[in-house]
Amino acid sequence: MVDLVLRSRRVLTGDDERPAAVAITGEKIVAVVGYQDPVEAGAEHDLGDTALLPGLVDTHVHVNEPGRTEWEGFATATRAAAAGGVTTIIDMPLNSLPPTVDAGALRVKQRAATGQIHIDVGFWGGVVPGNAGELTALHDAGVFGFKAFLADSGVPEFPPVSPAELTAALTAVDALFVVHAEDPAHLVTPAASTAYADFLASRPAAAEHAAIATAIDASRATGRRVHILHLSAAAALPLISAARAEGVRVTAETCPHYLTLDARHIPDGATEYKCCPPIRDAANADALWRALADGLITCVVSDHSPCTPELKRRDTGDFAAAWGGIASVQLGLPVIWTAARERGHRLGDVVEWMARRPADLVGLPAKGRIAPGADADLVAFDPEATFTVDPRRLHHRHPVTPYAGKVLHGVVRATWLRGRSVTAEEAGGRLLTREG
């Protein structure tokens, strides 16, 4: 006798997609059997041709609470995530106040999240100048690793580190380090302009290439794991490939906006498209897709980075003055599936990029997969259904998105977290800490 059985003709188990029944007891998957196999259960749902996916794991989310809750917040961010099929997020150490740069700040953030989260939430720690001595205690407190900026983060309380400071941080603690890789020497302070091309020119691919070389050098010198965040510039891919072939412990991610949006089609003044590093052209996106298919880019995550509408400066359309960040945690799955299916990829590929590999990156073996012993984090996803993105139906705090009006394939019909249906009313998520 199990608590719940979910049946579907399209269950995504690893690389396999097959008819199956998923049996759940308590919070765990206890068996995956044939679609028509009899299972005695307290409740049962047959999803038919609606696919059953593992809950997605998004390791790059800026919740901003406490301190800048008017930008987002745990309640709204996690509702949006659940609506998009995401059942686990790892929150970035900025733009909250205080930033998560010591164990005390982590406790402040954990208290802020308690009782508000609709999905499971873990935390990154931060590396800033002068806090290398705090990293061991912060790691022991359960953060999943440490984020560092090599260029200005956009907020004064989270300054960038020099190459020497990055190497010192890697030396201080054996942990995963995730790096915003843009080299300030290659960045240009943009003049006020409504032209996206002017903003793009201020953050050239050379800035990413140089900073990634710095991160690789630090990893090579220390033997520590380094993960390149939100890779935008495909020109840096050979550098990463060569380092991996050499045995350097470096991986990379990218984001839906870099894979699906084209700089040439961004209208003047459309500051909802601004992010750092920037969206580049279609040929660059094609190269990112090839790297994703080849496994050189390991995962796709949102870099959900919202702000108030005023900070996006749609009133002036000035890219130089606007906050750089795209809010997309609710839309990542359909955005990627829409583009992936057009390129001949399978739904299983999307699950690999957005569920299993992010979970593996941060060491969550019970997340991101449908298998006995895994958490019963599951998503009913209709891959054939379409919808038009209406910002008014988004759950994150401010309805600002570059995807407004786009027709996407794939609709999330239901989300389960550890065997229980996620609702907008019940905040049933848990705080996660690093295992081991």
Image (cartoon, grey):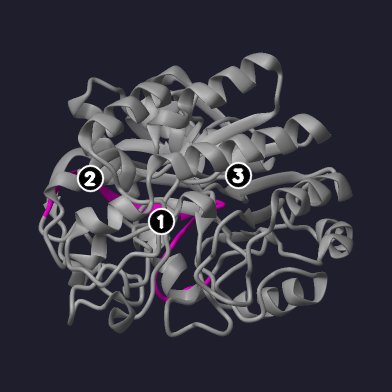
| Residue 90 among magenta residues | no
Which of the two labelled residues, at mark 2 and mark 1, occupies the earlier sequence position?
2
Mark yes or no: residue 287 visible.
yes
- Residue type at mark 3 is Asp
- Picture quarter with the N terminus: top right
- Residue type at mark 2 is Leu
Question: Observer-nearest residue: 163 or 258?
Answer: 163
As displayed, is residue 33 above or below residue 87?
above
- The answer to whether the residues at label 2 and label 3 have Cβ atoms under 8 Å apart is no
Residue 383, x across and y down, in percent: 23, 37
- Residue type at mark 1 is Cys
Please give the label number shown on residue 276.
1
Q: Say which residue appears at 44% left-offset and 17% top-offset.
A: 294
- Picture quarter with the C terminus: top right
Question: Observer-nearest residue: 38 or 142?
Answer: 142
| Measured Cα–Cα span from mark 2 to mark 3 | 34 Å
Which of the two labelled residues, at mark 2 and mark 3, occupies the earlier sequence position?
2
Quick one: SS at disc 2?
A: loop
Question: Observer-nearest residue: 228 or 51?
Answer: 228
Give the labeled residue for mark 3. Answer: 375
The quadrant in which residue 244 appears is top right
Mark yes or no: residue 44 visible.
no
Question: Label 2: few (<14), some or many (≥20) within 10 Å?
Answer: some
Residue 175, x across and y down, in percent: 78, 45
The quadrant in which residue 266 appears is bottom left
Give the labeled residue for mark 2. Answer: 261
Residue 148, x across and y down, in percent: 65, 55
As displayed, is residue 274 above or below residue 315?
above
| Position of residue 369 in the picture relative to residue 199 (left or right) | right
